[in-house]
Image: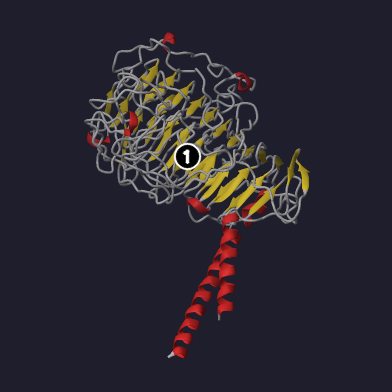
Amino acid sequence: MKSVERLSQNVHRQSLLSWLLLGLAFFAARGALAAEYYVSPTGSDSNPGTQASPWGTVQKAASTAVAGDTVWFRGGTYSPSAGITFSKSGTSDTNRINYFAYQGEVPKIDFSNMNVSSTGYSMGITVSGSWLHFKGIEECCLKETTFANNGFDVSGSNDTFELLNMHNNMGNGIFMGTTTGGGNLILNCDSHDNYDPTTTQGDGQNADGFGVHYQTSGATTIVRGCRSWWNSDDGYDLINQEVPVTVENSWAFGCGYSNYGTGRPADGNGNGFKMGSSKTGVRHLVQNNVAWGNKANGFYANHSAGGNTWYNNTSFQNGTQYDMLASSWDAAGNRTDGVTLTGTKVHIMRNNIGFPDKNVSMNGVDTQFNTWDLNITPAAKDFLSITDTTVGGTGQAIETSSLALGPRQADGSLPNVDFMKLAAGSQMIDKGTDVGLPYVGAAPDLGAYEYGATGGTPTGGATAAGGTTATGGATGAAGATATGGAATGGKTGGGGATTATGGATTATGGATTATGGTTTPIGGKTGGGGATTATGGKTAGGGSTGAGGATVVGGAPGTGGNTGAGGVAETGGTSGVVDTGGTVETGGTETGGSVVTGGQIATGGVPGSAGASSPVETGGNVVAGGTPQPGSTGGTTTSTEGGQTSSGCSCRIAGRQATGSTGFALLGLLVFALRLRRRR
């Protein structure tokens, strides 16, 4: 019997030992999964890619890095003779491939010397991989022959593009054109001075700042906190996009012009925000944006067969402020213009400013609480400033004198400037209606900025890429912060709506991500899978969240839907898909500016180490990358490269996952395994 027991014990110990060895192998493999690589214009692809011996080309990094890896690009100019392709993918929001600018440095990819085809497209940076994160990179100067070539040409999904500066390309700054996938996030990026003079479609016809096109299925793409100026065609273009897109907290000016505003391309359209044209009538969400000085329209529906949701936008001195032109298509694809949208297909417009009030094609529009509805004639005295040098100015010099084109804030959000913000006593204060955006005072203000709010434009928050954003969803207007005041009757009490400085956003009835609240530090990893909301949910007026996170009376959330204004049902979108990368919290309390009910991003984004901002060129400022993780093993080596001295072992390519806790786990398992063997 004892021998049987001893045999059983030995078998049990052997089993434990096997599992422990498997555990050791798991931890070892886990640590080996994530690596860090370095690239420098002075490096060589024959090097090992360490900080002391970096690679020399961007393509080497793109071809080598795998899920979990981080590539640090040192400052300086990279001049490839061919396009660069990023085809490898991460696996999830927490296991991306990161391509970051090194702290305090600006890597510039200059395609001036690239050989371009005369018979087809030659894209600069082609991104077909998914779950990638690009941050702090400057890209420029891609040429063309007869085809407009894009700086970034994207067909991957769930990618994040952050703090990019794309300019002087003969095509789009960034172009997303795929029928499936989506779920990308374009955060705090600049795209400007793109102009295609020689394409077959005409002078300036195909150089937009930001383009999202052709998608018929998949998740919502979000454009947030971006600037687009002096692009020969349009600032933001969603033509032929059949999945809802959210464009928020962004600026567009001078579109339809070229050569720093001095040229007027014959075929450039010149719209600031061209939010169409959908043949199926999907509903895009366009909110908290400012358009000024564009050749054609500030905001344009561009023949869509269904209406969009337009909340709290400001349009100033454009050719036309708002053009809601609608069309229909037959089975053969023939278009009929000038149709009147009805029922759930109508445009929904709330709390917008037109200065001057000059709109067209306003039939088939549910328009309330806008300046033209309220018989408000905006005047200069209503604003802190209407005289930024970008207004009516031309020439490269204004990029150095314009506050609007100055450095971004430390979190990467748009500059906090007076331009187009409401002044004390403005006619637009408290004249809006509650659409779910936080506000200060008795009622929401009109336009992109809430009077009395702090923190500027709330564009710093990291939103989950891959989540479907609610049509009509609520994103914070200029980051209102207030104290006290319980909300009653569906509206926030005077000084109520307490949000995070920088603008935490909530949407009653649907989870909207925070803009400006949860900010990813420089070098950190942007969460890509946060709270998502349903598209086309029923609009529930009067549902603002009061201080402390309590939902006010009358603001009962619609099932899976997002709040809009006026109780108008929106059925043009698709149902919301919750991305598994982040969790939605309900009923959360709010203390001193935390994210309120339904809008908190949970897991997904891993902050880096206290990155620093870095201006890029005149007028197109890019915050450069995150804090690198210098080596810490194998002695002490000090290397100076690119003007920056770094200490520690330069040969480290250890994974971020192979932390000290993993080492202790390995040691503990090893000791336990050895003790088991001795006991045998």
Q: Is residue 544 above or below residue 145?
A: above
Identify the residue at image location x=30%, y=30%. 544
Q: Residue furthest front?
A: 2
Whole-percent x and y of residue 309? 33, 32
Q: Quadrant of the image for the C terminus? A: bottom right
Closest to the observer, 305 or 338: 305
Residue visible at 66% across and 49% down in the picture: 58
Q: Is residue 203 visible?
A: no
Which quadrant is the N terminus positioned in?
bottom left
Query: Horizontal placement of 96 versus 357: left or right?
Result: right
Residue at numbered disc 1: 462
Q: How many marks?
A: 1
Q: Is residue 556 left or right of residue 416?
A: left
Q: Amino acid at mark 1?
A: Ala
Residue 373 falls in which quadrant of the image? top left
Nearest to the observer: residue 112 or residue 68: 68
Q: Where is 16 relative to 194, above or below?
A: below
Q: Secondary structure at mark 1?
A: loop
Q: Position of residue 538 (x, y in %)?
A: 25, 38
